[in-house]
Image (spheres, coloured by chain):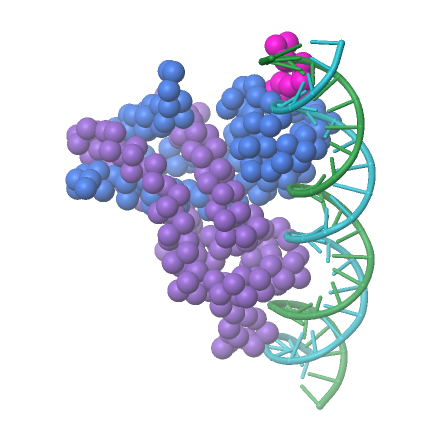
Chain colours: A blue, B purple, C cyan, D green
Amino acid sequence: MPDDTTQELTQMLQDWIEVFMRRAMHNVLLFAKEHNFSMSQISALLNIRQRRVCNVSNIGDELSITSAAASQMLEQLVQQGVIERTESPHDRRVKQIALTEKGHQMIHDGFRARYAWLGELAASFTPSEQEQVSAALRLLLERTRRLDVPDRG
Amino acid sequence: MPDDTTQELTQMLQDWIEVFMRRAMHNVLLFAKEHNFSMSQISALLNIRQRRVCNVSNIGDELSITSAAASQMLEQLVQQGVIERTESPHDRRVKQIALTEKGHQMIHDGFRARYAWLGELAASFTPSEQEQVSAALRLLLERTRRLDVPDRG
DNA sequence: CTTGATATTTAAGACAATTTAACTATTTGG
DNA sequence: CCAAATAGTTAAATTGTCTTAAATATCAAG
């Protein structure tokens, strides 16, 4: 049974995510429409970005689609020049997928443009509040990233 | 030109959102698959939940689809019993859309189940850290909600 | 070298979401 | 009361994504 402060923080995190989720969904839908990406492709791009490099079936597994579907979807991303597909030097059956410079740039710009409101939000705090919130987010980030890489540091 | 602490906080928020976004996308895709909802439907449900009540074209505008498409999509949600569609008393042309009790429950349960990792995350902090992070999130929430309702309080 | 398994690709078809166009019902403004 | 505008629905056609099935290429093991 979690104690009071744990419960309160959990609730706080859930509230924050609910509020943020709507904005995120809206932004993602707009970004997708603007760049002619499907939702799967957006999700794939975010994944590739995180992993830096992966293969076709990784993406299929992640999105719960067949690797045939993943292959077709990734082909479109290659055509658009946002990812590159190279033969793995270790196993010539597998194709290594990675973002191109253009792909990196597009995602980066997308985030910057889409989250201008974060700048507004940040500026609405007093300097001391800003430091307090920054410190808290730093803690959160560090722990969350630890969850992303469960083993082998 | 924003000052240093504003910039740092903005960067922190962006980093947090990037990390969170991947997890959110993954969770949303799973939730959609599980309940047989399209991405549009998920987004519609979140919107209806926020607005409490709205009409068909509101949803169309929000998702950037025609109201014909919105009408068809909402019809499915009615069939599944998660929203209800009633005639507006003020203007009999418009239909008021709102979540049913079942719809509320489903979204609530979905959040709770999907974000169990937030409990883990919360528990990984010391009590004093928990209070620090809670306080920061409370600040963030309050300001963000203020952005959601720009005018007429 | 041969057999079986794995990674990916391709083509064909199924299915779902969206648009277009036509239509009904209702309101608004002269 | 009438004409134009608005909100929503329906059907047909379009589009795009996914699955299935078959094929290719490579690896791993005997």
- Could you tell me which residue is drawn at 29 percent across and 34 percent down? B120
Q: Is residue A113 visible?
A: no
- Where's residue B2, x and y in %? 41, 26
Instruction: Name the residue: 49% across, 65% down.
Output: B81
Q: Which residues are magenta?
A: A84-100
Q: Nearer the viewer, residue A120 or A63?
A: A63
| Camera-side residue of A73 and A101 | A73
Determine if the magenta segment contains residue A95: yes
Residue at coordinates 54% horizontally, 19% vertically from top-left? A52
From this view, report whether residue B21 is shown above or below residue B55.
above
**Total marks drawn?**
0
Q: Is residue B126 magenta?
A: no
Q: Is residue B35 above or below residue A149?
A: below
- A137 to A30, vertically: above or below: above
- Position in image of residue B147 (x %, y %): 41, 45
- Quadrant of the frame with the N terminus of chain A: top left
Residue under the point 65% across and 58% down: B69
**Quadrant in which residue B152 is drawn:** bottom left
Location of the C terminus of chain A (image quadrant): top left
Where is residue B68? Give x, y as percent.
Answer: 66, 61
Q: Is residue A91 visible?
A: yes
